Image: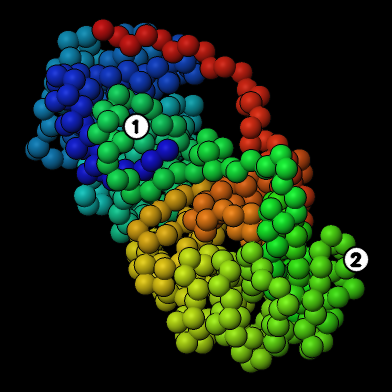
Amino acid sequence: MRIFSAEQLYEADKATVKKNQITSEELMEHAGTQVFNWLHKRLNNAPVPIRIFCGIGNNGGDGLVLGRFLLEHGYTVLIYVVNCSDKRSQNFLHNYQKIKAITNNGRFLMKGEADFPEINDDDIIVDAIFGIGLNRCPEGWVKKLIQYLNESNAYKLAIDIPSGLFSNSPITDPDAVLKADHTLTFQAPKLAFFLPETAPFATNFDVLDIGLDEEFLHNTEPLAQLISKAEAQHFYKPREKFGYKNTYGHALIIAGSYGKIGAAVLSTTAAFRIGAGMLTAFIPKCGYTILQTAIPEAMVITDEEEKFISDITLDFEPSAIGVGMGIGKNKETVKALEKLFKNNRAPFVIDADALNNISENKDLLKLLPKNSILTPHPGELKRLIDKWKNDYDKLEKVKKFSNKHEVVVVIKGAYSAIVFGDQLYINTSGNPGMATAGSGDALSGVLTGLLSQGYDPLLASVFGVYMHGRAGDIAAGQMGYEAVMSGDIVENLSEAYLDLFQNEDANEAPTEPEEKK
């Protein structure tokens, strides 16, 4: 699924109206119908008061269309017009006249705080105040209205986007944004739904297809692409019938130091679980017995040093290299990294202390092999690219870093983002249970294992992040968020593969009511 900017969606509206020879009012009617269908299917004429707060732009027009359909189907509806400006869109005025024709009750013009209605906990609030066209934070009594609605325990349903939230730019006043329980967004999800600072305002959402021109959208370069099961299925490379271990590469994991050999165990196991044909772990001497015991399938090379890695000497050419997990920041380890980058052209996954060493020794940046995959958590990322003003500034800084050094950057977290040049991919798998020690080590092993099988770096990143997250979802489904350990993620990579082509075990949704003519 693709994510578009507000400007691109407005252009899609225009293209749809022109191509289909319909009016913008007819397009709004269709959008309002989709919202009504979604809500009607779930409420089934339940006697619950529905309070619709409509702005005076097109988002308010969507709310009026919904209100009209709900009234025609016998719902208890109260409509409030948030009269915040002298400017009204033609689509709003058109639908305001339509709703006046069927009822004079339940309409209330709001001009200030004195007009705020009493709201009960069992009401449903529909937010249709501001849409994606908003270009500045709500102020004055309108801001206070949003705060008043946020304080209510009533269920809050936002149309297209929660009021006060910008589609693809940072917010400057979080207190002026509605916190929606659910958002029904039109045609495509918005970038704001996936970024740490803005996602909490739209924690749950459904995408409603309102019929925007598919050809126009297909030919429009998106802001980002969402990665879910459907996309991951296309990325998967099936195993060859007559393949053998060499077919799937010889991966090298360089990891561990005294007290952190577990990082090497986790990443090595993950590389095997994701499908690497062979694997060698390069570790300090203190980890030899641990590795040979924990993972008998792996070959082991030990450094001359007992407790840390000091010099990486290889007698084979690896298909892919994963480095950094738990290696520490010893001066000799930094020199070993420099030698490794200079002497090896295999595709790299660079994580953890390797990233920290690069941040503290900027000369290593010049040696970064092209197309390497960097997997920083927020702290490591900040050390690499410096501080950012907001999430959008962060993405721009990462894009510049990726372009300059020709590397893939995986920004780890909820909705992990994969950046390659100006391309942005947002992962949808994963859960809070994965916020546990070693989860990143497991991801590095997954990515290294995929590289060793011949996946190109961008594809390995996008597919690997999805599979890692899906394994975490399966683990959390078995034991709950709090109990998930990184080893559980690794063990469930096999289940993630099985799940990839499994039919969804869910009841079919009931047929939606037909669109009103």
Q: Nearer the viewer, residue 374 or 144?
A: 374
**Residue 187: which disc?**
1
Residue type, mark 1 in image: Gln
Q: How many marks?
A: 2
Q: Could you say where residue 150 lies in the image, as x and y percent from the top left? A: 41, 43
Q: How is the image coloured?
A: rainbow
Is the N terminus in the top left, top right, bottom left or bottom right quadrant?
top left
With 384 as the anchor, is 102 left or right in this view?
Answer: left
Camera-near label (2 vs 1) is: 2
Q: Residue at image x 50%, y 73%?
A: 369
Q: Is residue 151 above or below residue 158?
A: below
Q: Residue furthest front?
A: 242
Q: Residue at image x 43%, y 59%?
A: 419
Q: Residues within 10 Å of mark 2 (few under 14, many from 20)?
A: few
**Is residue 216 visible in this depiction of the protein?**
yes
Q: Is residue 236 above or below residue 394?
A: above
Q: Could you say where residue 389 lies in the image, as x and y percent from the top left? A: 36, 68
Q: Could you say where residue 206 lies in the image, as x and y percent from the top left? A: 44, 32
Q: Residue at image x 59%, y 42%?
A: 236
Q: Residues within 10 Å of mark 1 (few under 14, many from 20)?
A: many
In terms of secondary structure, where does tag 2 sit? helix
Q: Residue at image x 22%, y 11%?
A: 103
Residue matched to label 2: 293
